[in-house]
Amino acid sequence: MARYNGTLWEGVALRRLRLGADPDAPPRPVALPAAWEEEAATALAALAPGEGPASLPRLVEAWIAKALARGRKAGVVGEAEASRLAEGWRALLLTRRGAPGAEAWRGDTKAEPRFVLNLPAFLEPEGGLDLEGLAEAARLGMRFLDAWSGGRATRLRLGFADLSGLLAGLNLPYDSEAARDTAAALAALLRGAAEAESGAMAAHLGAREPVALLWPEPPSVTPVPGLAAAARAALDAAAASPGLRHAGVLALSPADGVEVLLGAEVAGLAPAPGATRAVSTGSGVVEVPTRAARRLPESRVAVLLAPAGPGARRLMADAVTPFLCAAPPQPVAAPAAPRPAAAPRPALRRQSGHVLHVTVGGHRVALRTTEENGQLREIAFSLAKEGAAYRSLMDHFAQAVSTGLQRGVPLSDYVEQFAYTRFGPAGVVEGDPEIPRATSVLDWAFRRLALDHLGGALPQPEADDVVPGSMARPAEQAPLLPLDLPVSERRRNLKLVG
């Protein structure tokens, strides 16, 4: 790393791995700091363009150089501050506090960029929150986004991840008024710091937007010492600006591999999915504590990382959204009255957050369900062996299904659509004696949901349908993902059998 001497890269020990961005991608050499986990390496393989070696220092220096070059050309970055900005962006990445979104890693200057702050990384070892560091990170994120757009963008996307992990680290249950006050104050602090930086740029480059005091009064008291005062001061500083360069600065976006690279476990405003996650090891797949759980005393894990229902998520969104410049993506829908079912459903006595563990074709799968008043409201998947891109797709798929369930779409509609879907992994199902084989993860999941929630079982697929060769014959080959599948005669006439 001789060419990085004199920067924060000097002395950073790297380790090298060979892996792909997902199970179907060819392995590629990946180099990243020795202390970072394998999941970060998989995310880096997904973020890096092409199929060759992916070195974290080389990729980071590439987007730093491009941002500075575009900023200099547009006159929004001066020569005297270029080194300071570059070192600030390196520091955010190496401390895993923040980084630009996938667009910058791939060098895409036409797409609208985003910058993500990993909130738990601002927790202080002795307790509390690094408020000055958070405000400085917001300013650095603003400078990066403005430089990357060549000073042309009027709306920037500075966002954050893993709010639930931060709240747990502050000993605040997600579904509590104290947590909502803290989240609102954090959003106010970030909004104020970002708009104050936009005002500082406007003082040198000219204002393009008026100062608009559209935000509500932030919480006057929070459990975090100094947070309420810092939020109020940041908003006051933004209000004192002569004008702004940008019409929007703080916005949450769907997650990509950057969140995983930074070590964030949850995107945006979402609550924690639980206290453990599935990890593949040389001897199999095991459930290990999440990063949030490892930061907590054992006696507080169950309280602080308990699954939160749609109501808690909705209240959190209501508290934070007034300080955002755009509504958060995929808002949680209010539970709608369920439609009449075609057949009576048996009463269910499962607790919210029930988890089912199986292995499908040698791949460990966990299906998490959440119920409200006896009705299925949410599903989520945990996939141990899959790559970041595949896991992200499954996460968004589960969120889409959950939103439909909350709006009253019958589960039977989803079962008919996705049972017998064919794509890898597929094969023998271990851990579910009532479903011995499946044509895909979705096939097992929705037949399991039909069995548990619709009071009946669907026929088992033929053994030939789940062997690897059955999906390799050109005449029968299905797409990798369950999109635009023709509706076969068998699937159109599915019936539940009790």
Image (cartoon, grey):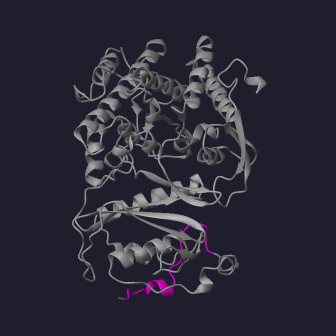
Rendered residue at 39%/87% (across/down): 495
Quadrant of residue 363 within the rendered picture: bottom right
Does residue 149 appear left or right of residue 18 in this picture?
A: left
Image quarter of residue 110:
top right
Q: Is 191 in front, or is 183?
A: 183
Let me know if residue 496 is in the magenta part: yes
Q: Residue at 63%, 16% (x, y): give it.
A: 83
Query: In this rendering, is residue 329 above or below 129?
Result: below
Compare residues 322 and 389 and report the one nearer the observer.
Answer: 389
Task: Report the span colored magenta.
Answer: 478-497
Number of callouts in the render? Answer: 0
From this viewpoint, is residue 443 visible? Answer: yes
Q: Where 307 falls versus 95 (above or below)?
A: below
Q: Relative to the observer, which residue lies in front, 106 or 137? A: 137
Residue 236 % position (x, y): 30, 17
Tell me where residue 204 appears, x and y as whole percent.
Answer: 48, 12
Instruction: Please identify the quadrant where the N terminus is shown.
Output: top right
Q: Position of residue 296 (x, y in %)?
A: 40, 40
Residue found farthest to the right: 2
Residue at the spot 40% in from the left edge and 52% down from the top edge:
274
Query: Is 305 contained in the magenta span?
Result: no
Which residue is found at the position 42% from the left and 75% from the top?
448
On-image quarter of the C terminus: bottom left
User: Please, what is the dominant secondary structure of the magenta stretch?
Assistant: loop
Q: Is residue 105 left or right of residue 461?
A: right
Kindly tell me whether residue 110 is visible in this rendering: no
Instruction: Find residue 342 and report its horizontal and vertical position in percent.
Output: 28, 82
Q: For this view, does 328 lie left or right of residue 373?
A: right
- Image position of 212 with respect to 282: above or below: above
Q: Nearer the viewer, residue 165 or 408?
A: 165
Question: Can you say whether 154 is above or below 433 in the image?
Answer: above
